[in-house]
């Protein structure tokens, strides 16, 4: 009985916080909720409202999109494991890349740390999560830039273009007047592009194009965008 009373009291506290619906609440349950509302009211009086930092929401969305993209990659690797041995290798590359982006080098496992060359660790590590303009939780690719090596690693997130269309990757330097430069069609597997110069504030994008890519060297229908930021 005591346990049941405790559960009713906890439910009343959650209804007071708004995390549980008030649907079906009886008179006794309402009284319990009102007691909790009185307790919580005092907390609201001593905590002044705080304006969240600029970019917080976008940062959260990018983090969710990146995690979702990596989960999709993991699921695809499991699906292909039975019939495509090459996917296992590329999956390992993508997983190592994700760890490298997220963790300082000293926190990596010893085996993975030995795989990271000294030249790679000296350069600035940058990343861009390229998400759909209308749905920031839908990622098209993750870009990892090594400024020391002058490379950009594209990790696609298994999005597919509509039938009869193609997705093309673009890079624009920071600045409103920067012209987008095509990096080719969106690959099906992670790839490393050489001689890439990119810095914080640059934009990577994906556009929808006719088969074979843009007919005039400019994005036809830009759909996904992501800004380059320092990974650590």
Image (cartoon, rainbow, N blue to C red):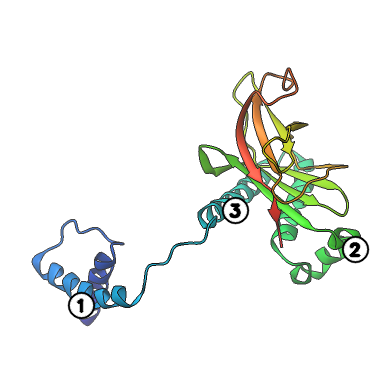
Q: Which residue is mark 3?
A: 67
Q: Is residue 85 left or right of residue 140?
A: right
Gap between marks 2 and 3, in whole Å? 27 Å
Q: Is residue 96 above or below residue 169?
A: below
Q: Which residue is mark 2?
A: 118
Give the numbered dot on residue 79: none
Q: Nearer the viewer, residue 58 or 114?
A: 58
Element under disc 1: helix
Contact between labelled residues 2 and 1, with CB atoms less than 8 Å apart: no
Residue 3 x %, y %:
25, 79
Q: Is residue 33 visible?
A: yes
Q: Nearer the viewer, residue 141 or 10?
A: 141
Gap between marks 1 and 2, in whole Å? 61 Å
Residue 88 x %, y %:
76, 47
Give the numbered dot on residue 5: 1
Q: Is residue 86 above or below residue 31?
A: above
Q: Residue at x 83, y 43 (%)?
A: 196
Q: How many marks overall?
A: 3
């Amino acid at each position: 009985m005591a346990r049941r009373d405790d559960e009713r009291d906890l439910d009343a506290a959650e209804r007071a916080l708004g995390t549980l619906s008030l649907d079906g609440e009886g008179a006794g349950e309402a009284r319990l909720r009102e007691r909790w509302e009185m307790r919580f009211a005092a907390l609201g009086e001593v905590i002044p409202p705080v304006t969240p930092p600029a970019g917080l929401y976008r940062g959260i969305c990018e983090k969710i999109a990146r995690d979702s993209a990596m989960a999709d990659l993991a699921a695809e690797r499991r699906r292909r494991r039975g019939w495509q041995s090459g996917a296992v290798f590329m999956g390992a590359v993508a997983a190592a890349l994700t760890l490298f982006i997220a963790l300082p080098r000293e926190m990596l496992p010893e085996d993975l740390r030995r795989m990271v060359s000294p030249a790679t660790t000296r350069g600035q590590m940058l990343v861009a999560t390229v998400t759909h303009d209308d749905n920031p939780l839908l990622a098209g690719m993750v870009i990892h830039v090594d400024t020391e090596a002058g490379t950009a690693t594209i990790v696609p997130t298994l999005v597919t273009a509509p039938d009869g269309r193609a997705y093309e990757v673009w890079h624009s330097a920071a600045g409103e007047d920067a012209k987008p430069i095509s990096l080719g069609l969106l690959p099906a597997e992670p790839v490393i592009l050489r001689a890439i110069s990119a810095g914080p504030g640059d934009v990577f994008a994906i556009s929808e194009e006719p088969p074979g890519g843009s007919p005039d060297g400019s994005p036809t229908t830009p759909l996904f965008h992501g800004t380059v930021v320092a990974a650590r």
